[in-house]
Image (cartoon, grey):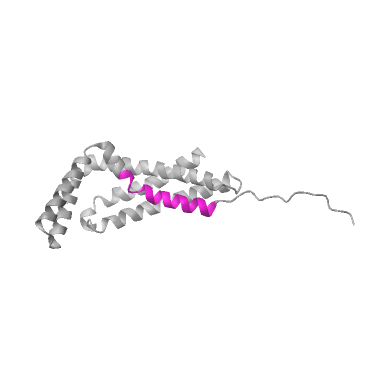
Amino acid sequence: MKKTIVTFGLISGAISSVTMVVSIPIAHRIGFDKGPYVGYTGIVLSFLLVFFGIRSYRDNVGNGQITFTKAFALGLSITLLSCLCYIATWEVLYYTVFPNFWDTYGGHLVEKLKASGASPAAVQAKVQEVAKYKELYKNPFINAALTFIEPFPIGLVITLFSAAVLRKKPASHPSRSPVPAS
């Protein structure tokens, strides 16, 4: 089970990490409004490995059988490993390549709010909210926790779906009772 978790978890994590690494340099061309579509598409694609990991384990190790509980545990483990890769990638990028993330993203949010005709009080509230997140993200543990909640719910849903679809109980054998003589 460990080999399946490590193999599929690392491949899944690599897909989400590569998506992040590729999209960060072109973020200014994609724009902050469309960036989440690119990011979450990469996350969903990476979590398809949860399905394939459960199926691989069921077919190659479980002799074609796996319970929902075991499939869920396997999928959740793959998801958690993938999330750890995603978090590690973000932490490195945030503190080295993109340390001004909240200045750039916050500026975008404030300008978007101003363009919508929001009141000065609403704009000021957004500025304070951005400043709060900028301060929170300085702590790597809080940064990691907030980053974890981006991919994990998607992985959890895909894990539940995959475990339900791929579960296969052992075929029950009818009891062998002697055939009555006629």
Percent across and percent down for residue 80 are 40, 42
Q: Quadrant of residue 90?
A: top left
Residue at x 50%, y 39% (from the top left corner):
3
What is the x, y in percent for residue 157?
A: 42, 52
Residue at image point 22% right, 43% down: 97
Residue 169 at x, y percent in the picture = 61, 49
Q: Could you tell me which quadrant the C terminus lies in?
A: bottom right
x and y percentages locating residue 132 in the rendered image: 18, 44
In-front residue for pair 34/147: 147
- Looking at the image, can residue 18 be seen? yes
Residue extending furthest left? 120
Q: Residue furthest front?
A: 121
Question: What is the span of residues highlighted in magenta in the rendered image?
Answer: 147-166
150 left or right of 2?
A: left
Instruction: Please give left or right for residue 154 compared with residue 32 in the image.
Output: right
174, 88: nearer the viewer: 174
| Residue 154 within the segment the image draws in magenta | yes
Total marks in image: 0
Choose top left, top right, bottom left or bottom right for residue 140. top left
**Residue 89 on the magenta segment:** no
Q: Main secondary structure of the magenta part?
A: helix
User: Could you tell me if residue 91 is visible in this image?
Assistant: no
